[in-house]
Amino acid sequence: MNRLALAAAFLLMVPGARAASLDLPIQAALLLEEPPSAPAPSAKPQRNVDGIMDNSFLVEEAYNQDAGVVQHIFNAVYGLNLLAGPDENRTDFSFTQEWPVFSQTHQFSYTLFGSTIHTGGRSESGFGDMMLNYRYQAYFDEQTLTALAPRFTLILPTGDASRGFGNDTVGYQWALPFSTTLGDSWFVHANAGLTFLPNAGPGQRHDLLNYNLGASAIYALSPKFNLMLEWIGLWQESPDNTGGTSYDFESVISPGFRQAFNFSNGSQLVLGLAVPMGLTGPAADFGAFVYVSFEHRFLKAK
């Protein structure tokens, strides 16, 4: 996976999510003998932040899937690089499926990648490296929605490295996502991570090490509609055309929105759109990000 493909992998893969709208607390009132004039107890009103908790685009949210709920995520990102010669435009796709392992504490997911690149009248398409992800819900407060969920990812060399769609090595990624809320309408998320690619550099036994940071602020206008502003920074080491190693910093800011559609059987569809814009030279100048998520129960709620 070349430098641009690796950046796309960070943009596309946001593993780890929690279906907030599927398991909101339901308060049942005990039927006690009261005078006829006593008012019936009312359910606690839903906060705006309770509606969509698990559908960020570039920045990973720290909420694992609830027990018995599976999530399917499809992402597509189009990026345009305005170069001195022929411009480069590429479209990257990903599909992620997230499964709780017996409970919300443990989560397994996998991510598949595909890309199409157009440069100077030439086009190439191929599949990228596959990611297998494990996340541990180390902390979660249901009232403040403060959460911490460390993730470990195994990167399998399923892509064609000779055409720039893979790294031709088994890689490892570690990430530390943190999430919390501010009042009833704001989410704040922060990420830190690194990717280790052994023997992926030029020459023998040259390892590559990449770092990433991310932050986002999300304003919930309602339980079903959110406005989003995300930022990511990628420090990347990669082989260059001269047989050496290049070091690049890619910074991207991305405003966007997401809309949830809740169904009577408890499933939820979330659609989102964002406009990522590069802040540094190595990043794509601008692009478009499309997000589709569907989550549903595969086990009956207890």
Image (tube, rainbow, N blue to C red):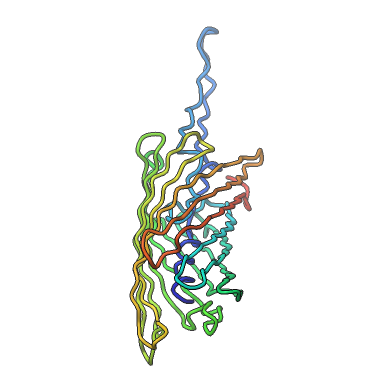
68 lies left or right of 216: right
Residue 11 in the image: x percent, y percent? 47, 61
Nearer the observer, 268 or 219: 219
Percent across and percent down for residue 212 are: 36, 64
Direction from residue 267 to residue 204 in the image, left or right:
left
Asked if 274 appears above or below 83 in the picture, the reply is above
The percent position of residue 126, horizontal first and vertical second, equals 60, 75
Residue 30 higher or lower than 283, as above or below: above
Residue drawn at the location 42% of the way across and 43% of the way down: 218
Quadrant of residue 71 within the rendered picture? bottom right
| Residue appearing at x 49%, y 31% in the figure | 46
Residue 91 relative to residue 238: left or right: right
Residue located 61% across and 40% down the image: 262
Q: Residue lying at the far front in this picture: please name it.
A: 84
Above or below 116: residue 162: below
- Image quarter of the C terminus: top right
Q: Is residue 139 visible?
A: no
The percent coordinates of residue 176 (x first, y second) are 36, 60
Residue lying at the far bottom of the rendered structure: 204
